[in-house]
Image (spheres, rainbow, N blue to C red):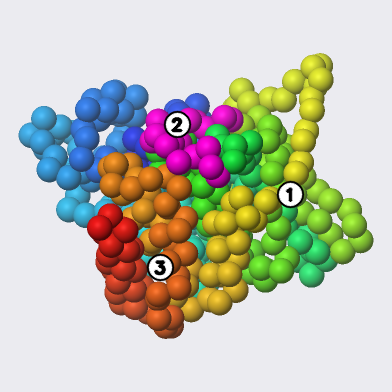
Amino acid sequence: MRNILVLGATGSIGSQTLNVISKNADELNLIGISLYDDLTELPQILKKFPNLKYVWALHPDAKKYPQVTFVNSLEELASLPCDLVVCAIVGFAAFKPLVSAIKTKHNVALANKECLVAAGDYLNALVKKNKVSIYPIDSEHSALYQCLKGEDIKSVKRLIITASGGPFRDKKLSELKNVTVAEAIHHPTWKMGPKISIDSATLVNKGLEVMEAHYLFNLPYAKISVVIQKESIVHSLVEFVDGSIKAQLGVPNMEVPIQYALFSGEHHLKTDAYLDFNKPLDLHFMPIDEKRFKAVKLAYEAGEKGLSYPLVFNSSNEVAVQSFREGEMAFCDIVPVIEKCLAKHTPCKVSSYTDIIRVDEEARELALSIIKEAKK
């Protein structure tokens, strides 16, 4: 029996992770979760998972739930004894508990790309020092992980990350001036949380995934490509030096990569996600238009420059997305805010935990100042 902690249990990935654990209750045991500030789902979760022992939430009404222990912080929760920590918290907010999990020598199933982007070198060094493993949950990186299994990394010509193109794939930039939040989070093939849905609409998400792949698989950016695959059936591909290509295909269902990560890179039977080859299946590939989707180009530039640039790319995007969601700025202004932050930022090394926290805070302040200035 594998004991599992889930950070971010009620988000899109977190709730699907609970579904996978429930389907594999003979092998997986949920012992701890974080809920942030909403306990409305806790009674149902406790009913479904009677072995749940630990919960973290802001302002919990602990008296109502004497059967569980409310821990004091996400870092404390991530450090509790277990076999695997699932990190499904969105954004850089996951950084501190992720570090705690790794320092406690826990293997991690990672559904958070922002932390690797912001602190990839630091986290990789920490993973190596503590001799733990990170199993990617993102469908694209899970696909790459599967395609690379058993292969010599020296034989890889390039990783090919696929993108659906988001809800505005076929629209011109001039048509996006009055995009609403509801339109931006309406993804054509995936059901995701609002932040990642907006990132998919700008294709910032794909830029983040390029940087994540760089840190996960230790390959230079010249060996990482992006292509649009609008059906979201081919989740990613690996091209080898002899021209052969391995691809991982599947229905757009996150429970498959979640289950694969929960079992440390092993395929398990309990899934309903199967492609039907008794019906015609069309697959369309097309290149990324870098002028149309400038975020991808900016991500490559930030990644190639290194130092604190990837961190600033992520931090400024998080601020811009939140401002868009709050009605403080237009959808079309998200990527320009990132570009301006990267241009104004003074690069520095981010080799320590303190450096990372400090630069993140500075980048957020810079992004907010740019947004405020644009409103004058």
* Range of residues picked out in magenta: 173-191
Dividing the image into 4 quarters, which one contains the C terminus? Answer: bottom left
Q: Quadrant of residue 223?
A: bottom right
Where disc 2 sits, the SS reads helix
Where disc 3 sits, the SS reads helix
Q: Residue at x 32, y 63 (%)?
A: 370
Relative horizontal placement of residue 58, taking residue 161 as reference (left or right): left
User: Disc 1 designates what residue?
Assistant: 287
Is 186 a magenta residue? yes
The numbered disc on residue 341 is: 3
> What amino acid does circle 1 point to?
Pro
Q: Position of residue 229 (x, y in %)?
A: 70, 40
Q: Position of residue 49 (x, y in %)?
A: 34, 29
In depth, the one of 312 and 119 nearer the eye is 312
**Marks 1 and 3, Cα distance to the nearest angstrom?**
27 Å
370 shown above or below 279: below
In depth, the one of 374 and 146 nearer the eye is 374
Q: Quadrant of residue 341?
A: bottom left
**Marks 2 and 3, Cα distance to the nearest angstrom?**
26 Å
Where disc 1 sits, the SS reads strand
Are the two marked residues, 1 and 3, in contact with CB atoms closer than 8 angstroms?
A: no
* Lower position in the chain sequence, tag 2 or tag 3: 2
> What amino acid does circle 2 point to?
Glu
**Marks 1 and 2, Cα distance to the nearest angstrom?**
24 Å
Relative horizontal placement of residue 45, taking residue 332 as reference (left or right): left
> What amino acid does circle 3 point to?
Cys
User: Disc 2 designates what residue?
Assistant: 183
